[in-house]
């Protein structure tokens, strides 16, 4: 059986007030084209389909039209909820799309109640164990649903590890066995664009606890495409777009897994080419001027190296680089000897130097006199 694994679409996500909907539409079309070209038997979307609990109508249109394309190509699809998805909202479409072989799972379930999805193709049967994001505030409810009380554990990670193992009890030696989950595997590398709270130590699941009876583990949550070192083949598909500047150097991709019952999965990553690249550029104003017109349609984070704070410089940069989304000024670092010399100077002299550096001109005598008056009053107040 041939499976395409993708995740973390984050439909509706903005980048510094810029919509990414057109880019996402292009990359989702590319993913559908890959699924058709590679003649896959199943698509897995491992969570964070949307970017927020209340996605815009345009974001919903992008997601559901993509699923409709897969239905039209007769490709079954498994979709699980991530920590950005509203579980109740996603669960609302479950019964509508199930007859179309779009299998939506928004909340953890027992194997016999929907936690195992069975898909038949090419004379093979795949059993897909599905574990959507487990919210920590609902852990007790999910424990009661998934496992008897005597198996409850004290930490989040221990309980999620048990859920993975419990779901894997529904695997057979005669079937293709896949686990898909939205979680943070300890040791995997984040990009900085994920929600920091959900990639912290309490949420970290040890890959050593992943069930080795799964021939492939298809993960979502971290945006960097990467393999996870454990007892079986396991990958994060990563996000299909560079979502923030922490992802600027990442080549986005999807995973193609070829699996036969009783054999290890054979994996291939296929790079994605749609979407705008994110790029850092830096230099003096003169150096940046020479780069104008050479950055294509990339979204830019621009750093200007300057000795003085220049009013209105951001507007100048945007004229040179219309796709500049973030503009920073970088000033020379003060040496240790210079910092030590400050203690030997009069406060008015330090103020004068600061004003000159910030404004590009010396302060007037009246301004210095006003500073000295304020400084004198402030120091008297602290005596």
Image (spheres, rainbow, N blue to C red):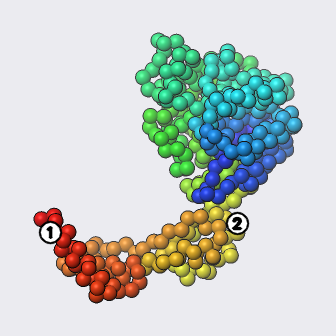
Q: Identify the residue position indicated by label 2 in the image.
A: 297
Q: Residue at x 58, y 36 (%)?
A: 83
Q: Is residue 270 visible?
A: no
- Please identify the quadrant where the C terminus is shown: bottom left
**Category of crowding for the residue at label 2, using alpha-carbon neighbours closer than 10 angstroms: few (below 14), some (14–19), many (at least 20):** some
Q: Where is residue 327 drawn, in percent x and y?
A: 54, 68
Left or right of 311: which side holds 111? right
Q: Is residue 154 above or below residue 3?
A: above
Does dot 2 land on a helix, a strand or a loop?
loop
Residue 380: which numbered mark, if any? 1
Q: Where is residue 381 drawn, in percent x and y?
A: 16, 65
Instruction: Name the image quarter holding residue 178.
Output: top right
Q: Is residue 324 above or below residue 119?
A: below
Q: Residue at x 60, y 80 (%)?
A: 289
| Along the viewing direction, whichever of 281 and 368 lies nearer the viewer | 368
Left or right of 232: which side holds 362? left
Left or right of 362: which side holds 135? right
Mark with earlier residue (2, 1):
2
Q: Where is residue 338 drawn, in percent x and y?
A: 28, 77
| Along the viewing direction, whichever of 235 and 150 lies nearer the viewer | 150
| Along the viewing direction, whichever of 270 and 273 lies nearer the viewer | 273
Left or right of 267: which side holds 100? right
Instruction: Name the image quarter holding residue 45.
Output: top right
Q: Residue at x 64, y 58 (%)?
A: 18
In three-dimensional space, the C-alpha distance between marks 2 and 1, rounded to whole angstroms, equals 57 Å
* Furthest residue toward left: 383
Does dot 1 land on a helix, a strand or a loop?
helix
Q: Residue at x 55, y 29 (%)?
A: 134
Judged by depth in the image, the label closer to the viewer, 2 or 1, is: 1
Q: How many marks?
A: 2
Q: Where is residue 217 drawn, in percent x and y?
A: 64, 32
- Please identify the quadrant where the N terminus is shown: top right
């Amino acid at each position: 059986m041939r499976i395409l694994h993708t995740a973390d679409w984050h439909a509706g996500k903005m980048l510094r007030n810029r919509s990414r909907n057109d880019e996402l539409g292009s990359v989702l079309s590319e993913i559908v084209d890959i699924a058709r070209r590679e003649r896959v038997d199943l698509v897995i979307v491992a969570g964070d389909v949307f970017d927020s609990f209340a996605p815009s109508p345009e974001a919903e249109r992008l997601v559901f039209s993509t699923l409709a394309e897969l239905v039209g190509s007769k490709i079954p699809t498994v979709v699980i909820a991530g920590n950005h998805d509203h579980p109740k909202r996603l669960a609302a479409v479950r019964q509508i799309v199930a007859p179309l072989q779009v299998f939506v799972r928004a909340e953890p379930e027992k194997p016999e109640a929907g936690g195992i999805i069975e898909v038949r193709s090419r004379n093979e049967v795949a059993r897909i164990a599905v574990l959507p994001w487990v919210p920590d505030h609902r852990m007790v409810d999910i424990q009661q649903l998934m496992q008897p009380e005597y198996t409850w554990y004290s930490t989040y990670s221990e309980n999620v590890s048990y859920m993975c193992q419990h779901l894997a009890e529904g695997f057979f030696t005669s079937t293709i066995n896949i686990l898909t989950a939205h979680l943070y595997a300890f040791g995997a590398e984040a990009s900085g664009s994920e929600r920091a709270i959900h990639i912290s130590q309490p949420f970290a699941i040890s890959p050593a606890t992943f069930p080795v009876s799964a021939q492939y583990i298809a993960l979502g949550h971290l945006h960097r495409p990467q393999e996870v070192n454990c007892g079986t083949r396991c990958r994060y598909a990563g996000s299909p777009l560079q979502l923030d500047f922490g992802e600027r150097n990442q080549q986005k991709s999807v995973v193609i897994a070829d699996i036969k019952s009783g054999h290890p999965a054979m994996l291939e990553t296929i790079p994605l080419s749609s979407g705008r690249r994110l790029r850092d550029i830096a230099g003096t104003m003169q150096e940046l001027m020479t780069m104008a017109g050479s950055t294509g349609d990339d979204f830019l984070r621009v750093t200007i190296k300057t000795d003085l704070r220049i009013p209105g410089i951001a507007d100048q940069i945007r004229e040179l680089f219309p796709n500049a989304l973030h503009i920073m000024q970088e000033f020379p670092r003060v040496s240790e000897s210079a910092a030590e010399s400050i203690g030997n100077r009069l406060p008015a002299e330090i103020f004068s130097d600061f004003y000159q550096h910030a404004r590009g001109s010396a302060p007037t005598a009246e301004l210095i006199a006003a500073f000295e008056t304020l400084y004198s009053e402030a120091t008297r107040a602290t005596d």
